[in-house]
Structures are given as C-alpha cells and as structure tokens.
Image: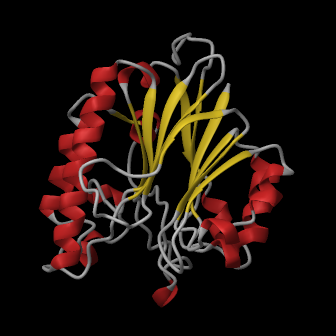
Amino acid sequence: MVKIASFNINGIKARTNALMTWLIEEKPDVALLQEIKSVGENFPSDLFENLGYNVEVSGQKSFNGVAILSKFPLEDVVCQLPGDTNDDQARWMEATIVCDQSIRICNLYLPNGNPTPGPKYEYKLSWMNRLYERAKDLINSEVPALMAGDYNIIPQDEDAANINTWQKDALFLPESRTAFRKIINLGFTEAFRAKNAGPGHYSFWDYQAGAWDRDDGVRIDHFLLTPQCADLLKDCQIDKHIRAREKPSDHVPIWIKIKEDGHRGDS
C-alpha cells in the first residue's frame, strides 16, 4: 500500500516542527507540499532526507512554492505547468514515483483568484485552462496519474460550513466551479468524494473570526485520479485533528492510500 498526502503548510519557516511531527506520526510515502514560501536553497531538505525522503523543491521567495517528498525515487521532474512560458509563479511540480506501480504525480497550488473581478481572477481562470490541457494529456496517456493539492475551489454547497459567505468569492464563483467540473468530466475521480459522502468535511479553516473553534471550514484541497489510478484507490481521508495543534497551518493534510501491485482498490 502506498500513502500519498497533500498538505498546504502555509510557510515552511513557521511550520517545520509541525511538519516533521506529522511526517513522523503519519509516515506518508509521498508528501506533496504547497505554499512553502521559500526559495529552494532555504528549504530544509536535509531534515526530510534524514527521514528517508527524496526531496524536490520549486520555490519562490515569501509566497507560493511547492515541494515533493518521496520515499520512492523521483523521475522526470517538471516544475512548470505548460501553456505560459512567462508565468514565473511556483505553483506546479510533477514527477513519476518509481515503485511496483509507477505513478505520475502532479502537485499544484492553484491561484486563489481574489479579489473578483480583476486580474487575479483572470489569472486563476487562465491557469485552470492550462490545467485542463495538462489533465487531458494525462487522461490520454492511459497511465496511473493524479493531480493533488490546494485547488482553492469549493466544489459544492456541502463543501462549506456556511456557503452563503462564499457566494461572491473566487473559490465558489460559478466560473471557478465550472472549470473544475470540466476537468473532472475528462474522466477523473475526485478521491475524497469517492470514499466519503455528505457535509461536514473540511480541509481549511481561516485564521480569522474563530473559524476553527466554530468549525467554519471549507473543503478546497483535492485529489483527482485518472481511471488507471482510481482503480488502485483504497481510501482517502482528511487529517482534521492537525488543525488544533500549536502553530498550525490554516489547511490540514488530505491523503489517499492506493494499491501498488496493480490489483483493483475495491477488491
């Protein structure tokens, strides 16, 4: 069984100890990190290498930034989402993990898009169009692959504790959700919903206005799996309890477990 997790850590400098504790406790085979807010040379790769992880970083000073930690070898690493060579924001990294069942893993930090309307929202939609094209290529490749990370998308009403407060937010605008559904409709499985139904499941609680204490959260971190990867899916859950710890990120980890021997996940 392979455990792959995604975690927006909201700054590696403030979250190193919390991240290390979680890695030691939960032991994911692969951890996809977003919003590391660090250039590569300042990222504490040696700490994670000492835990047995191979480390790849696509960093940026003070904001954005993604990284992949993997107990398996990483091959064919790409650090830019195709479609705009002028885009210098560090929001994308993909690589193949080499185990019994090689899997193409794409780690993403999708633009927030606020305030709307405006250039930030236009960038979000443009980025999602590029993501759609890459997603289409992954589907056409007919290999086990996934795209995971902070999508900054609330897919449905039930994915927010109080959806009325999000009606005019870039995370829930109709154009945003339509772009997300367009990607899923290529043939992807949204892993969490494949294993969990109903409201009350969140991955983000704002630091403001006591959102965590009131459980006023939203589900914006997602795993999308190609059919060949979905066949291997055993489980997908959210580590909600992490949010109650000292100096937490405003996000919590979401993870999947997949078979690595080629047997179907529901067998």
The residue lying at 32 percent from left, 56 percent from top is 158
Q: Is residue 224 above or below residue 219?
A: above
- Is residue 43 shown left or right of residue 64? right
Residue 156 lies left or right of residue 95; in this view the side is left
**Picture layout, residue 69 above or below residue 240:** above
Foreground pick, 109 / 212:
109
In the rendering, at what x and y percent does residue 211 appear? 48, 80
Identify which residue is drawn at 39% across, 67% down: 89
Colour setup of the view: secondary structure
Q: Quadrant of residue 172?
A: bottom left
- Front in this rendered view, residue 230 or 50: 50
Count of numbered marks: 0
Q: Quadrant of the N terminus?
A: top right
The spot of residue 244 in percent (x, y) is: 67, 72
Q: Is residue 250 above or below residue 76?
A: below
> What is the x, y in percent for residue 197?
40, 42
- Location of the C terminus by quadrant is top right
Quarter where residue 59 is shown: bottom right
267 and 145: which is toward the camera: 145
Q: Considering only vertical position in the picture, is 266 above or below 120?
A: above
Task: Write the residue at 39% across / 59% down.
Answer: 220
Residue situated in front as seen by the camera: 108 or 25: 108
Residue 6 rendering spot, x and y as whole percentages: 55, 51
Q: Residue furthest front?
A: 85
Residue name at image x 56 percent, y 44 percent: 237
